[in-house]
Image (spheres, grey):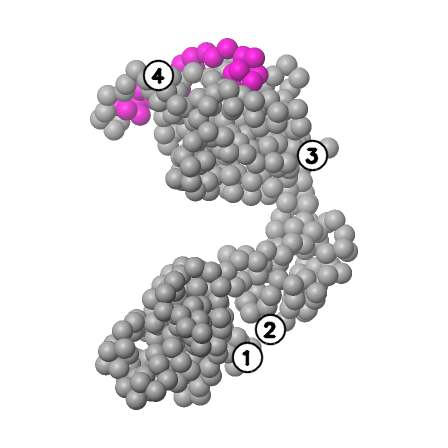
Amino acid sequence: MPLAVELIAVGTELLLGQLTDTNTVFVAQSLATAGIDVYGTHAIGDNRSRIVSAMRAALERVDGVITTGGLGPTVDDLTKEAASDALGLDLELHEPSLKQMQDFFAHIGREMRENNRKQAYVPRGSLVLENPRGTAPGFVAFDSSGKFIACMPGVPREMKPMLTELLIPFLRERYAIVDGIYTRVLHTVNLGESEIDHRIDDLFRAGENPKIAVLAHEGLCDVKIMAKARSAQEAQTLLAPVEAQVRERLDGFIFGADDTTLAAAVHALLQPNGKTIAVAESCTGGRIAAALTAVPGSSRSFLGGIVAYDNAVKIAELGVSETTLERFGAVSEEAAIEMARGARERLGTSYAIATTGIAGPDGGTAEKPVGLVWFATDVEGEMHTYQFNFRGDRDAVQRRASVMALGLVWRLLSRRFS
């Protein structure tokens, strides 16, 4: 049987929504890749008895518990004490950790307070996980049956290397884990989750290894193909035929794989063909330009953008006609066309994309509701327009419209150059 664990993120701030728990996502993904099954995840506040209860309950179901957070020097950092209670172990001073802590404070020129000494205590017999990036060591402690609790700091820059460099290698060796989970993620745009499911439905049921999952987010859909194998080469043998089938059935909608972003895919089509692009944004407020410039080397194909929110800016900077705005309004197909044309001509690019819409929460009417966005693309003088209605709050409308804009550009370019 594979090693099974549950994850506990400790911190009242997580329950109050004051901090986003990115640690659990990273830990779960890293464990899956290492071939360690995660059966459940939990968030517990800074309460010793509740943490103990959660640990004991989890150990009844799985082989071990992995925690993040609550290893600091303050009175509400209680994870270590809870782990000792859950396992029935006393705490003991780990002298090397104390020495490392003293050296750390001396190096940064600060006095080490007495409460920091608390961090050098670990459950008796623990395997200590060194933390050269901070003051709190991690540890792995075992009960009499061999089940374990592994505790790591909550600070991501301390926790992540401790997990990948120390904890996971230890667990894989101790439990003789030879298989890992290898993943290939294919990114699609302008294709709904239900349509993808329809097209590859039989592949879902074809077998357990590889497995397929479809994940939708913000106008994009990812097809995740996961194989359990002893090596990357063996995994590739399993993944390749399934990936080929998925690509065939979703042809024309897959813009990239793994770490490729939609903006990067746009640049990858523009640059080999010596083409450039500009943006004219109203309701998206510069988000498209931000996505395009986030890609290294983007200056070779992205020349600039104009955020024309007020009508006066649309007129002065993009050459939108006053008559067009008076007759059709700023949120219209006609205005979007003139914005795209103005951006391409004034910035001297091959292509341009323009957005104008109503992001809300106010400003909507029966004819032009909140969420309505017009897009126009100018492809070397050839104009294309699109209208969409997006759901959600202001931020959601802006994000989805930005993704849609990049998706429209990518589709046009892929048809032109692929």
Say whether marks 1 and 4 touch (CB < 8 Å): no
Do the residues under discs 4 and 3 have CB atoms within 8 angstroms? no
Q: Residue 2's mark?
A: 3
Say left or right for 32 vs 139: right
Which of the marked residues, 4 or 3, is nearer the chain's N terminus? 3
Residue 44: % across, % down: 49, 30
Q: Which labelled disc corresponds to residue 144?
A: none
* Residue under numbered circle 2: 252
- Which element is circle 2 on? loop
Magenta: main secondary structure: helix
Residue denoted by label 1: 415
Mark closest to the chain's N terminus, 1 or 4? 4
The residue indicated by pointer 4 is 117
- The Cα atoms of the two marked residues, 3 and 2, are separated by 39 Å
Q: Position of residue 152 (x, y in %)?
A: 47, 29
Badge 3 or badge 2: first in the primary sequence: 3
Q: Are marks 1 and 2 in contact (CB under 8 Å)?
A: yes
Kind of residue sitting beneath label 3:
Pro
